[in-house]
Every structure is written in structure tokens, then in C-alpha cells.
Image (spheres, grey):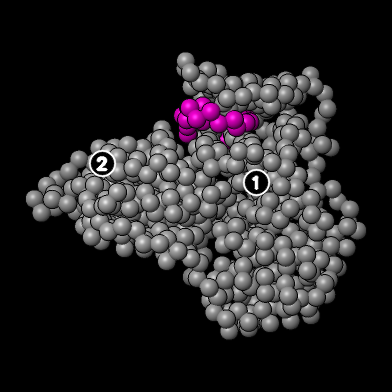
Amino acid sequence: MANFTVGNYLATRLQDMGIKHYFMVPGDYNLGLLDELLWNKEVEQIGCCNELNASYAAEAYARIRGCGAVVTTFNVGAFSALNGVAGAYAESLPVIFVSSGYNTNDPGANHKLHHTIGTHDFSYQYEMFKYVTCAAVRILHADNAPSMIDYAISTALRERKPAYIEIACNLADAICPAPSPFETVAALDPSNPKALEAAVDRAAAFLNDAHRPILLAGVHLRSFGAIGAFRELAEKIGCAVAVMPNAKSFFPEDHQQYIGIYWGPVSSLGTEPVLDWSDAVLAAGPLFTDYTTCGWTGIPAKEKMICAEPRYVRLPDTEYTNVALADFLSALAKKVRANDTTLTQYRRIEFQAHANVANSNGNGAAPLTRAEMWRQIEEDLDPKTTLLVETGDSWLNGMATRLPGGARFEIEMQWGSIGWATPATFGYAMGLETDRRLVSVIGDGSFQLTAQEVSNIIRHGQEVLIFLVNNRGYVVESEIHDGPYNYFKNWDYSGLIATFNASDGRGLGLSATTGGELADAIGRARKHKGGPVLIECQIAHDDCSPQLLKWGTAIERANSRPPVRA
């Protein structure tokens, strides 16, 4: 077409980013924008049940496609989506959040508008989203649209964080300049060459002087494209490699150097003592929080740690800025010496890295237990599977689940928003390669928050497998601090699938109360085509992992510390 509209321009940039789908909920302010976005047939518009679910779906889509996008209406839609956008910020995922805005004629006319708080100030949505995005723009004139859209998108891709774009509702079809080549818009900042060289030399000396070096993989490896460089470094040294819980699967679990999850007292068996015994820890892309350290109990000592962050490297006595993570790890691999002392020590310990099989009762007629459920889940995984786990005991059990080479793992650990997993399953599956499968494990309480998105999983014929853990309450909350507020009305979860199917769906709902019934259900799930399978796994409320008991106690202790007295 000869002329671009603001909406066409945005649609083109979404395509340029590599997005094939964006998630939306229609509202009167954004209907014109949705029309203009439909102009681009290379980017598909995906409706969600509500804006919160749409933002969760876009966040999960960014995990597999590198970036995502969500479109909502003004205020009522945007504020519903804010939780998921904040989650994308916490998880370092570039999600382009697009909101329609008010008509540009209204402020000058001194109008009060619907979907607002009834004042003449319409800027508060923009101001609020500035706190959970790395760039925020308000497009109030078509001539400014190209530069503002490009600024927001390029910043999001560079910083690996969400960006906010607000487009006035009467500007979606306004004419604006055509897009320039996308290569001029977005790229990660390069390292400062001198800073990079100095950081590598100092880190190499630190590791080469150590007797017992070990590597620790962190969550930012993926966001900043450093997974390959980390593996290159690990294989050059040959030492033991541990991963933080939110970096599970970023280093292959069938690799000879992998020793497990480092998570303080709930670490994989044998991992914590070897890391504590080491005299040099290179932590690559870590995020040390109360959750990832089990209440501050699992942090390597600063005097023996190199902390390689996305844009800086910190050693015990110095720090180097403007150093990109992937550049640093790759360059460091060329200067380190081989040292397998920590890996040799781990092998001497001869701990088994997981205990699901040992804990299984092996009786198919016995009531279903957590251990038997997870034994069967692990057995069902293959190299083409992604295992996605919801906040709660699924985190702890997921950590203990051994992934075959090539399998992936997804967890929303930094934000930890209960209800994330169901719409995340939808969004992730939308971006999933055709030769891969998705298995999600979701607790009953989490499911009740966002269950309606299963209808869209059915609508799009996604052949995902959901294990719905029905243990009658928020078990993770109970193990942190129990109370009557952790219990809710039970649902017939497997029966919901028939309701969501209506007359045209191909979902399958099954229920398992014994190990034998679960095995039969998984067998049926493997054969089912044309839609999702939800298996409701009924287990006792208090049947949780021993690691959750430790983790919950540590988190309660951290949360309940008394105020420091002056």
C-alpha cells in the first residue's frame, strides 16, 4: 500500500520482531487499532478470555519466541494486564504492551470519559506502567508514531524487558511514514572492548588460581543469549556445573558435568556440599532472591564468587561495567585452564540426584501419591518435551524431575504469580515448534484463578497435556503459614473440559485416584488428537515434597523477621 497507518506501522514492527501471534482482548477504545493490525496477515490476532490471561500468555510466548505482545483497551483492560506485564519485567522478557488511549480531542474539550477514574487527567495509566516497563511512550500525533514505536521496541529488545505503547484511539488509522529497515532499530549493546578484556583477564586469573572451581547457571543466560557461551566455558574447564532453580534446563541434565540444582538446603542431593566446598564460583546471569536462595540460605560467599551479570562482571575486589554476558563467557573460555576437581568430588559422593522412583509405592491399586504422580510424569517426558510448572510444590517436584537431553523447563519464579500457568500454557503452546510437546503441572488453587483460558487451548486445538494436582488447597501457602484462608471450594476439574468443549471442542478430561488410573490416563493422553488433555490427579492435601517443608519454613522465617531496632 502507498501509505502506512499508525496501526499498520505497529503491525509491521511486530512482524519484524519475529512475532507470529499477539494476544488481545477487544474494548471500545482499541477496536479501530485491532482493525488496522489485521492488515498484516503475517501476524495473527489471538483473543483471550481476559486481559490478565492475555498478558500471561504473551509473557510465556516471549519465553519461546524471544518476544511477545499484548493489546488491550484503556484503563479497565490495561490495569487487568498490569500484573502479567510486571511479571515479564521481573522475568526479563521483552513483551510489547499496547494500549489504546482516549480521543485526542477530549482533553481540550474538558471531557470526562468512561473507563477512567472520572478526572480530567488521563496520564495516570502511562505513569503507572512506567514502573514495570523499560520504555513508555504515548502516541498523541501520527507524525511521532514511527520514532516512538521504534524507541519502545528497540529498548525492550536491548534491555530484555517489557515496553509500553499507548496509541490514541483516533490515531490508529492516521497516516504516518513507512517503516525503515528493522536492522537499524534493535540490537543488544556491544561490550566495551577494554572493559571486556580487563574483566576476562582478571576472571581467568581468579579461576586458574583456584583449586576447586565450579560454575553456576542463572536465569539471565537465556534472556541475554548466553546459554551457548556458558556451555562453551563449562566444557573448556571441565568442572562441575550446577544451575539455579529458575535456570533449570539451561544446561543439559544428561551432560556429564551436570550435578543438579543449587538451592540452599533444598538443593539436589550432593550439589550444595560440593558448591560450598569449592573455592571459586562463577555465577553466570544469577538472580539471588529470597525465593531462589531458600530464604537467603543458598548464596555463594562473595569472597569466592565471580558474578557475571548481563552488563557487568563483579569479582570480590573489583567490578567491570559495560561487559555483555555472552561476550564475557565466550572470551573467558579461551583463557581458562581445565580443572575437573569439583566434578570428581561430586562423583565420589555418589548421591542419586532425584528420589521419585525410590519414593514410589509401585502399587497401581493404591491411592495416588505425590511421588507416584511425579514418577509417572518424569517417565512420560522425552527430549521434545517442555515441562511447565506452576507456583507451589510443583516447583520443588519439578526441580527433582530429571529431564532428558533436549527437554526444556519453564518456571515463573521471580514474580511467582499464582494463576500464571494456565494462560502461560496457552501462550507457550501458541509459539511451540510443531515437533515439540508441552506438559504443564498446575495446582488446583492456581487453576481456579485463570481456568477459563483452557477454552482457548481447546479453541486452537492445542495438544497439550495438563496434570491438574487436586490436593484441596493452597499447599505451598500452608507450608509457609497455614490458616483457614488456604482452603477453597473443590471443583470437578476433569468435568470442566466437557463444558469448555461445548459442541465443537476436542478436549479430553480424565481423573486419577490411583497409580493405575494415572498410567491409563497418560496412555490415553498420548493417543488423543485435536485438543488438550487434562488429567485431574487427586492426592492428599499434606502429601507434599520434603523440600517444600524446608523451603516453606525458610520463607516464613525470612518473612517474619522483626523490624531492626535503631
Q: Please provide the residue range marked out in magenta.
A: 450-477
**What amino acid type should be assigned to the residue bearing mark 1?**
Phe
Q: Nearer the viewer, residue 390 or 178?
A: 178
Callout 2 environment at 10 Å: few (<14), some (14 to 19), or many (20+)?
some
- Name the residue beneath numbered marker 2: 32
Considering the numbered disc 1 on the image, is that residue within a helix, a strand or a loop?
Answer: strand
Q: Nearer the viewer, residue 442 or 387?
A: 387
Location of residue 390 by image quarter: top right
Badge number at residue 68: none
Q: CA distance from mark 2 to mark 1?
A: 38 Å
- Would you say 85 lies left or right of 290 here? left
Q: Nearer the viewer, residue 444 or 145?
A: 145
What residue lies at 54% left-to-right and 79% top-to-bottom? 192
Give percent across and percent down for residue 38. 35, 40
- Would you say 222 lies left or right of 368 here? left
* Label tally: 2
Q: Mark 2 or mark 1, which is nearer to you?
A: 2
Give percent across and percent down for residue 209. 79, 80
What residue lies at 75% left-to-right and 47% top-to-bottom? 405
**What amino acid type should be assigned to the residue bearing mark 2?**
Gly
For residue 472, say whether it is visible: no
Magenta run includes residue 384: no
Q: Residue furthest right?
A: 348
Lower sequence index among marks 2 and 1: 2
- Would you say 57 lies left or right of 38 here? right
What residue lies at 25% left-to-right and 61% top-to-bottom? 144
Is the residue 309 above or below the residue 219 in the image?
A: below
- Name the residue beneath numbered marker 1: 409
Magenta run includes residue 458: yes
Label 2 with label 1: CB-CB less than 8 Å: no
